[in-house]
Image: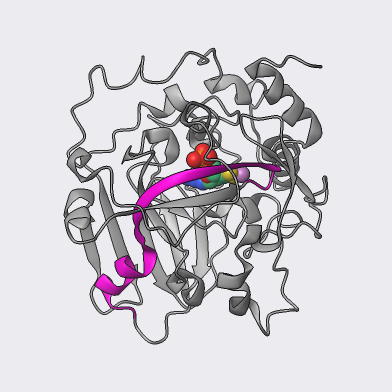
Amino acid sequence: MLIRIRRAWDQLREGEATPESVFLDRRRLMKLAMAGTALAVAGCDDAVSGDVSAAPGAASGATAAPDPSAHLYPAKRNEAFTLDRAVTDEQWASTYNNFYEFGTHKQIWAHADKLQVRPWEVVIDGMVAKPLRLAVDDLLSRVSLEERLYRHRCVEAWSMAVPWTGFPLRDLLAMAEPQAGARYVRFETFNNPDVASGQRQPFYPWPYVEGLTMEEAANDLAFMVTGVYGKPAAPQFGAPLRLALPWKYGFKSIKSIVRITLTDSRPVNFWQDLSPDEYGFWANVNPQVPHPRWSQAYERVLGTDDRRPTLLFNGYGEQVAGLYKGLENEALYM
Ligand SMILES: Nc1nc2c(c(=O)[nH]1)N[C@H]1C(S)=C(S)[C@@H](COP(=O)(O)O)O[C@H]1N2
Ligand SMILES: [Mo]
């Protein structure tokens, strides 16, 4: 085909790699069925579907109060973080999103617009000397924002390149003074089924959870995102606070965080809980380790016809390979 319209790209993608959802739902159902749970599930996935293919912006902002952090943008770009490809068109990145709280498909941006991102508090607790409960704007006044160009590789084999704005994760953890025994950081997303219709689907282990080791969280690349494309992040990007971990598959970059807990036990993340044979704790990008249902050798670049070879650690090996010395027996790449 010589001429492609936008929707065609979508269909191509869905055909090439089964989205994270389909198989998992069946698995999860079997698990629940075996546990004797009765479920009415027919049509569940369609609960949040609908035509939201119009441009974003039309539906957003009309009634919402102006973002109180808008004056912090655009932040100065940190030139240490460069790309080997063009930045993804904003229109694409903001209308093709993965955010299961608002649906299992990619056109969730208008649904996510219902998420109220102010007031918003984040709690830092667990193995810390100074547990914190911070309003997001107080937090923003205590950090220094910068822009970084990062690649993003979804486990489903699509990729993008995005100008995130935010600050190093380790700066946030330092505010709470981690105790010596803390080994992992556990992150949790909001849980509000009234707003997020995906969270009314009981076979998912809500709320969305992710985890990192303390060493990973302290790495230069581990970035707490508050904005994108030179302005505060829109809800579909995971406002007001999400992670960006460019060397790991996209599902590790948890959105709309409300709680960060330091712990000595390894967190079980959302996707691992759903399907432990397919998704693990580490989830580092590796083109040589296929997903059980598809190859990870190549990626489709969002909004283009490009198909590129995927790189080990998504091209960030120089910065992160050292984190995994001595862990060769772990499932580092799923
Ligand atoms: N809370 C939450 N965070 C999430 C997800 C999600 O469904 N819920 N999806 C993840 C996946 S699989 C990907 S690829 C990225 C997508 O980020 P984007 O929509 O900004 O491209 O968000 C990640 N963070
Ligand atoms: Mo993903």
- Residue at 55 percent of width and 52 percent of height: 83
For the C terminus, give its image quadrant: bottom right
Front in this rendered view, residue 239 or 205: 239
In the picture, measured across the screen, residue 255 lies left or right of residue 205, that is: left
Which residues make up the magenta segment? 154-178
Give the x, y percent position of residue 260.
37, 62
- Residue at 73 percent of width and 69 percent of height: 331
Magenta stretch contains residue 287: no
In the picture, measured across the screen, residue 209 lies left or right of residue 3, that is: left
Colouring method of the image: one colour
Snapshot quadrant of residue 10: top right
Give the x, y percent position of residue 17.
77, 37
Numbered marks: total: 0
Front in this rendered view, residue 21 or 33: 21
Front in this rendered view, residue 37 or 182: 182
Give the x, y percent position of residue 266.
55, 71
Give the x, y percent position of residue 229.
39, 38
Image: 210 above or below 309: below
Magenta stretch contains residue 166: yes
- Residue at 65 percent of width and 40 percent of height: 37
Image: 329 above or below 149: below
Residue 206 visible: no
Image: 125 above or below 276: below
Residue 235 visible: yes
Figure quadrant, ligand 2: top right
In the picture, measured across the screen, residue 295 lies left or right of residue 53, that is: right
For the N terminus, give its image quadrant: top right
